[in-house]
Image (spheres, rainbow, N blue to C red):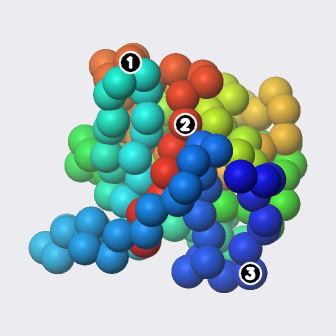
Amino acid sequence: MGPFVPPMTRRSFLLASGMAALMATDALPSDAETPVDGVIEVISGEARHRFTIEIADDNDERSRGLMFRESMPGDAGMLFIYPDERVASFWMKNTYIPLDMLFIANDGTITQIAPMTEPHSLTPVRSELPVRAVLEINGGMSETLGIEAGDSIILYR
């Protein structure tokens, strides 16, 4: 599979880990308490970890992110998608819960994890390399599940 071609809309977005991409419309829960735009599967060795996700793929959504949320289900997250690869930078202003930030390359590989980011911090959390997307999940979840740099993701829509 060649390099990821930047999508024009969130419906066309898919990150794949060098294998045929699967699209599953039935993967979404119908009774979600928080908005759900898709399901992401993190492939970590033989393990697969699923998260229901919201997608932030425009400037307004990316700017707001998970600000002002007092909690998030353990199997939920937010995927920030950029129109092209770039060094991504986040802060935790007005974010009440600690987060793990998984920085994702164009091919779906997790290149870096910023674990347990500090709520309300104004200190930037940056990717070391250009990335195409960032997945935010509850703080400590990466360690709990054994998710590491080098693992990959698939987005189901």
The label nearer to you, 1 versus 2, is 2
The residue at which mark 1 appears reads as 146
Kind of residue sitting beneath label 3: Met
Instruction: Tell me if residue 27 comes above or below residue 79 in the rendering.
Output: below
Q: Which residue carries the number 3 mark? A: 8
Residue 100 placed where, x, y %? Answer: 49, 32
Residues at marks 1 and 2, CA–CA distance in whole angstroms = 13 Å
**Mark 2, other Cα within 10 Å: few <14 / some 14–19 / many ≥20:** many
Question: Gap in Å between the C-alphas at discs 1 and 3?
Answer: 33 Å
**Which badge, 2 or 3, is on the more N-terminal residue?**
3
Give the secondary structure at mark 1. loop
Tell me the SS state at disc 2. strand
Residue 51 shows up from this direction: yes
| Residue for badge 2 | 152
Q: Is residue 134 left or right of residue 88?
A: left
Circle 3 Cα neighbour tier, 10 Å, few/some/many (<14 / 14–19 / ≥20):
few
Tell me the quarter of the image containing the C terminus.
bottom left
Quarter of the figure with residue 27: bottom left
- The type of residue carrying mark 2 is Ser
